Image: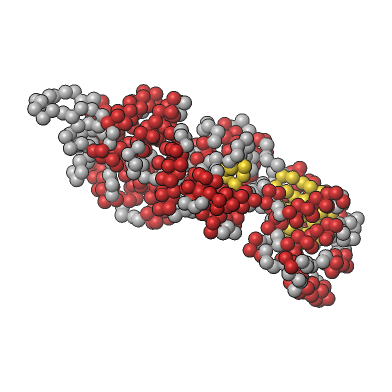
Amino acid sequence: MFAVQETREDRETRIVIRDRARTDTVRRAELHQLRSVLDEVTNGHQRVVDLAGDPGSGKTRLLTALAEEASARGFTVLRALADPAEQHLAGSLFVQILRGWIGLADRAGLRDELIALIRWIAESVDVPAGGCPTPDRLRALLEQHTCRGLLIVLDDVHAADPGSLALLDGLIRWPARAPLAMVVAHRPRQAPQGLRAALARGSQLGTTRRIELCRLDLARAAELLELPATDPRMRALHRDAHGNPLYLLALARVCPGRLSGRPEGSLADLRGLPPDAALPDRLARHLVTELAALGPRQRLVLAAASVLGTELDSSGVAAVAGTTEDEACRALDELRRLDLVRPLAGSPHGGFRHPLVRWLVYDDIDNCWRVDAHRRAIGVLTARGAPAERIAAHIERSTPGLDPRDAAVLTEAAGTALRTGDTDLAGHWLGAALTALRRQGPAADDGVARRLLAAADELAARTGSRRLLAEATARLGAGDRPDGSVAGRPPRKASAPARTTRPTRAARTTRAPAAAAPPAPGGPSLDLLTEREREIAELVGTGLRSREIADRLGVSARTVEVHIAHTYRKLGIGSRAALVRLVVEEHGRVS
């Protein structure tokens, strides 16, 4: 079972999950229906089950449980998995079945017949030319050598070659007179016309039974994670996973605490994912198999779509991809047929099948291309009058401050978040706006700086935390301008006599660090960092490289670099050497 343990990390409750046994499933009703098919074939009649479900809905786990049950009853169990790379091999799905049978055959005569049948299928006329293997010899062999019961499990049949579909169609139309149970598992949105037609004919003839794997309800989702259905995290996970078991497990592993209480749809723009999140291996393998079959044009358009995010249309995707609208339109249609992109309800636009699919595609993009693509997306959204908070997500991921307007958009997005009561998001956007202003240096707009300080002050008043306000005051303080002025305030007059004034609370706690001097007691401190950022900073201080730190912490090197970049921004430094010096000096002060 999935054992759930709760720990405290970065003040978030995380769910640690151990994998279930491969045959354990919460879909007990569906498994009962499959088991009943084994009972029905014992009277010598063939039964075909049409097992339909979205990716990650639990088809393979059900098939494994059924195979173990059939084996325990004395059935011969044969399994095959369709491979998109074998589209050119006629009958490859049934060739797998026959090869598996050879390994189980207890008579030399049966082995010879199986080998001869494999050769016959392999040497069949090329299917696109109009010919295909007929199922007569296959049916005759099944009837002759199936006496105690045979279970044939065909998985991912939506990816089967036309020859295999022709053989399947023949067995559905003219069933074998033998105790044969055959389960055809597929993804209905990706099923080709030939498979849909064969299964529809079987339904009309009464030779197939359909079992559809729907979304898990809240109770079964809670059982899968072994959490109470009343747990607030459970409702958020169930909502954002769309009731899909694979997505439920993935989200429970990477970001349960952040999803709790977040507004619906926050995961779609990757805001719901923590910076150190890593895609679980099982989900990554599941999705990589789908993406491996894409062509160059499909990959380019899918990458652009992952940058643009939601509400995908051909003109916007074309602009981000740097291709023509006609090419983008055709590629998006192909991606819809592959169920990587789906139509949005009540909208002419499309969206990813699930945000986790977008995450995998996005994470695999070349970083330099991705930054440029985000800048192109900013242009598209700005021209369309998109809200600041949507544009801000692209600015954040494309080096804030490259454009003089970045800080203004980020500050506006923070204001929107404050008005809606999302103080966490407001602080996030203000931090990015501060980075943008810092990068612009003396060219920073005074009006934007004033609005940023005002928003930081309001955030401090609402949350009681003055860390961001202190950081903003320090970074926008004296030294940013050649004349010694503070951003957003009039420059000091050179002739004015020096006055001794009582420093503000923010100025007493945080000061702008000198460029080369050791940090003063009021300068940048590791206390500004999160627990994970401080841990990585300490390891950097020991001289470890990013890859060595990643291996030690069990995360990716890219995750380590993200944390280091956040550390640079918070501490107002710009190099690894400066971070090492700061760590060493802070240790010296503690000693």
x then y, percent, for residue 84:
65, 60
301 or 564, which is in the foreground?
Answer: 301
Q: Is residue 211 left or right of residue 541?
A: right
x then y, percent, for residue 485:
19, 32
Q: Quadrant of residue 171?
A: bottom right
Q: Is residue 249 above or below residue 173?
A: above
Q: Is residue 88 above or below residue 11?
A: below
410 or 279, which is in the foreground?
Answer: 410
Q: Quadrant of the C terminus?
A: top left
32 or 417, which is in the foreground?
Answer: 417
Q: Image point 43% across, 53% down: which residue?
A: 369
x then y, percent, for residue 269:
50, 40
Question: Number of callouts in the render?
Answer: 0
245 or 335, which is in the foreground?
Answer: 335
Can you see residue 523? no
Can you see residue 62? yes
Q: Image point 25% across, 32% down: which residue?
A: 487
Q: Image point 18% across, 44% down: which residue?
A: 517
